[in-house]
Image (cartoon, rainbow, N blue to C red):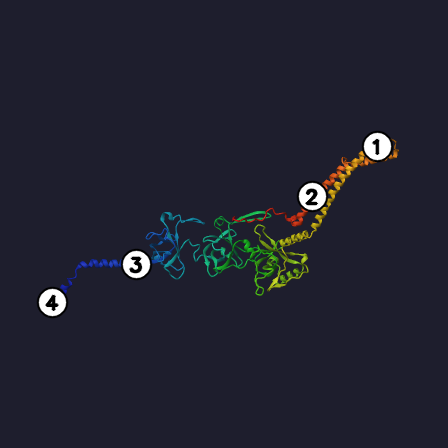
Amino acid sequence: MSNEEQVTATVKSGRSFSAVWILPLISLAVGIWMFYQYESNQGTLITLHVQTADGLEAGKTEIRARDVKVGVVTDVQLNKDYSAIVVKARMDKSADRMLKEDATFWVVKPRIGREGVTGLGTLLSGAYIALRPGESDKSQNTFNVLDVPPIAPPDAKGLRVVLTSKKAGALSVGDPVLFEGYTVGRVEKVGFDLQKEKASYQLFIFRPYDALVTTESRFLLTSGVHIQMNAQGINVDIASLESLVSGGVSFMVPEGQPKGYPVTEQMTAFELYDDLKQVREQIYHKVIEYALLFGESVRGLNPGAPVEYRGIRIGTVEKVPLHLTDKKQGFASKQIPVLIHIEVERIMDPDVSITAEELKTALSNEFEHGLRATLKTGNLLTGALFIDTDFYPDEVGKEFLSTYRGYDHFPTVSGEFVQFQRQIGGILNKLNRLPVEGVLTSLEETLDASQETMATLNSAGKELDGLIQRLDGLLAQDGAQNLPQELRDTLEELQRTLRGFNPDSELYQKLQEALSGFNDAMDGFSPLMKKLNQKPNSLIFGESQLSDPIPVKGEP
């Protein structure tokens, strides 16, 4: 085949490509370019984990940063074990730089809480997910959505501290942190430390108030209202209206304590106290340990009870009992040991320099002069006891233990109730030793003699009455007129004397009344002496009116 023929065949074969395919090819290229442009302009697809999907809708719920839309929710579904809600969201391209590992998400919707009503703007627009951009260098596309808005951003200027407490549920997220009644921070997180077995509360103190937190600061729960009753009357303090409704936490440096140094390290740990009283009781660090031995019941004496000297607190009960068993003697303790702490700062002024050993030596000298500890009732309603110390002259010169199982020994005396029991027992013993039977026998003999005397007097009265009548008859005779005057005067005097002992005379009546009264008194005193003979202590305690119940067959 010639060259011309080959060219002609080639032209014919090229004409077989139809122009109809040009338009589809262009459309395909444009589509591929548009898809590329769409994908290149799309942001990152992120995964959010939430506890509830209330208010969230796929294709409608927006993700906003400072109220600017930066993404939208694309899918809402349960995870595999149904423990949480998995939300897929497509972010804008411009929002990729916000997705750092410290970024924060939370749902904004209408809320009624301690801080008031928030999120009212979402009543018409619907709930949305708020985003607080992170500042970390590491990117991330999976996040947990918070239940409540965060208190402060990670880069916020201020101080974060952690409080530990044995009481869980004392604080909630958002509760105020107060200093002198002014809100200077918020409770940021609430958790529980499994290793320490204590509740933990993370606080954020806003700048510049973070400079108020020092190494000597004490954090305590704030109830919002404090009522104090004393000799001056009733004092009521209210911290703030917010703390009155929701409570909170406040911090301070106890009066008389050094201010300390400002805390600059983040997440410094402090202890959370229940109230100001507990703070004041636990600010004393220099203590002396003493063991006390009580030969009476310590029921009502609890750890934390005060140790006082004439009404002034000088220490605290640390352990009740110190122990009950002994390796050699087993469970055999005639006396109950109690461990106390004498707090040096309570006794000495801050400007007085004294060591614990010096105070211990001074107390040992006072023991020789009768310084003793005893149990006293602090509350009659609850039966709570406390330890009181004072000087007892009767104890001067008596021997006492210097140590007890490695502890310095603080000598003791019996409590008021035990002494009262001993006094009552002594009185009853004296009553039991009284010669009651001899007294009763003498009384009975006296009564019998008085009765015989009364009978004799009655008989004598009758005889005197007859004698007077005979004398009257004798003097009335005619011959009596002729008797000598002296004899007549003697008979008349005898007649007047005998009339004085007549049963109808005033003297006789008074004598009979006196003897009758004495007889009645002896009759009334006889049952009393018999009762004392049977039960001598009835004179003090009386006689019980209740008899012991007698069980009857068939009754429950």
Give the residue number, with chain letter if any, for mark 2. 523
**Relative to residue 386, is residue 473 drawn left or right?**
right
Real-space CA distance between mark 4 and mark 1, rounded to the nearest whole angstrom: 217 Å
x and y, in percent, of residue 240 in the image: 50, 49
Q: Which of marks 2 and 1 is in front?
A: 1
Give the residue number, with chain letter if any, for mark 1. 475
Real-space CA distance between mark 3 and mark 4, rounded to the nearest whole angstrom: 52 Å
Instruction: Inspect the image, locate mark 4, and give the three-letter code of the amino acid beneath it.
Output: Glu
Give the residue number, with chain letter if any, for mark 3. 39
Give the residue number, with chain letter if any, for mark 4. 5
Give the quadrant of the N terminus: bottom left
Q: Is residue 160 visible?
A: no
Q: Nearer the viewer, mark 3 or mark 2?
A: 2
Q: Earlier in the sequence, mark 4 or mark 2?
A: 4
Q: Is residue 487 visible?
A: yes
Real-space CA distance between mark 2 and mark 1, rounded to the nearest whole angstrom: 46 Å
The residue lying furthest to the top in this view is 478
Instruction: Inspect the image, locate mark 3, and give the three-letter code of the amino acid beneath it.
Output: Glu
Q: Which of marks 3 and 1 is in front?
A: 1
